[in-house]
Amino acid sequence: MQLQEILFTQGFGTRRVCAGLVQQGHVTVEGQPVDDAFAEFDAVDGLRFTVQGTPWIYQAKAYLMLHKPAGTECSQKPSTYPSIYTLLPSALRLRPNKGAVQGVQAIGRLDQDTTGLLLLTDDGQFIHRMGSPRHHVPKVYEVTAKHPVDDAQVQKLLAGVVLDDDPKPVRAAACEATGTHQLQLTLTEGKYHQVKRMVAAVGNRVEALHRSQIGALTLSDDLAPGQWRWLAPAEVEALRSGK
Ligand code: URA
């Protein structure tokens, strides 16, 4: 693939802008400066290049995890708080998809005050698969409650509680008290405000909410709030196959 095309697919601007970046000497590939915009490279995942000093890796599709900080909205057009998308480099927001600039999108949403693991991708099929009710990917939430948690609350959450929009009870796939005011709750569905509403249904109240795990993937300890990292191919595969 031509170098200008490689940069274009990775979100570095129009083909003309990308050609200009190369011709003006702003691009290196595998450590070597390249100023021919038409130079051909194998576009394999992992190809390393830099643009204006910023290191980047070629990825045909982008899959990443973000440590969502509190006070951010998972919307492209936020109403009150800054969008999580402002935490990402512009190349991730400007990746073209089927002819349009679309960038990566969050897989599901977290409330503005919820922190923790959020997945983003520009792979529409992956978003669809992860969101499919049949896929049932377990998601683990760490709850800090206003009132002490007790065994009766835990048992009710496991047995199932009725929320106001559906007579069918929803139950936690797993639930345990992890402190006097802490619960770890695993859900396989993603209804609106589900954790907060389930905890309210057993007479308590969520004071803080953090998502620590999706499927087998845990939020990396070394990712500070607001930071992101690429997912490894094996991590994407494990999520895709429901492990
Ligand atoms: N459940 C909630 O109530 N809020 C979230 O952000 C995620 C799950």
Image (spheres, grey):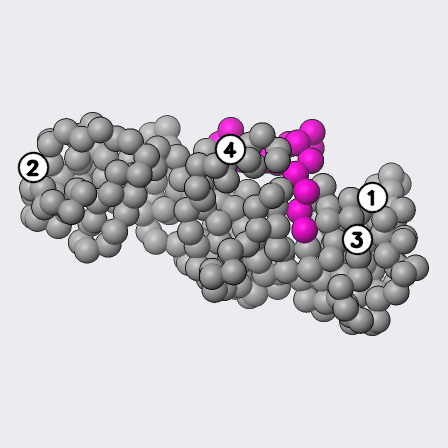
Question: Which dot, 2 or 3, sits closer to the camera?
Answer: 3
Q: Is mark 3 within 8 Å of ligand 1?
A: no
Would residue 131 be counted in the magenta stretch? yes
Q: Which residue is denoted by mark 1 in the rendering? A: 170
Q: Quadrant of the N terminus?
A: top left
The x, y position of residue 49, in whole percent, is: 21, 44
Tell me if residue 128 can be seen. no
In the image, residue 121 sits, relative to residue 211, either above or below, namely: above
Kind of residue at badge 1: Val
Residue drawn at (23%, 35%) of the image:
6
Q: Earlier in the sequence, mark 2 or mark 3?
A: 2
Label 2 CB sits under 8 Å from any ligand 1 atom: no
Q: Provide the residue designation for mark 2.
A: 36
Q: Amino acid at mark 3?
A: Cys
- The percent coordinates of residue 203 (x first, y second) are 88, 63
Query: Where does the magenta region start and end?
Result: 124-140
- Tell me if residue 51 comes above or below residue 43 in the rendering: below
Measure how far apart labels 1 and 3 are at the Cα level.
Answer: 13 Å
Q: Position of residue 134 (x, y in %)?
A: 69, 29
Q: Which comes sooner in the sequence, label 4 or label 2?
A: 2
> Does the residue at mark 4 contact the one at mark 2 (Cβ under 8 Å)?
no
Q: Residue 39 falls in which quadrant of the image?
A: top left
What residue is disc 3 on?
Answer: 175
Give the amino acid at mark 2.
Asp
In the picture, the quarter occupied by the C terminus is: top right
Instruction: Specify which label sits upstream in the sequence, 1 or 3.
Output: 1
As drawn, is 212 to the left or to the right of 182? Answer: left
- Which residue is denoted by mark 4 in the rendering? 237
Asked if the residue under mark 3 is in contact with the one under mark 2, i.e. CB atoms within 8 Å, the reply is: no
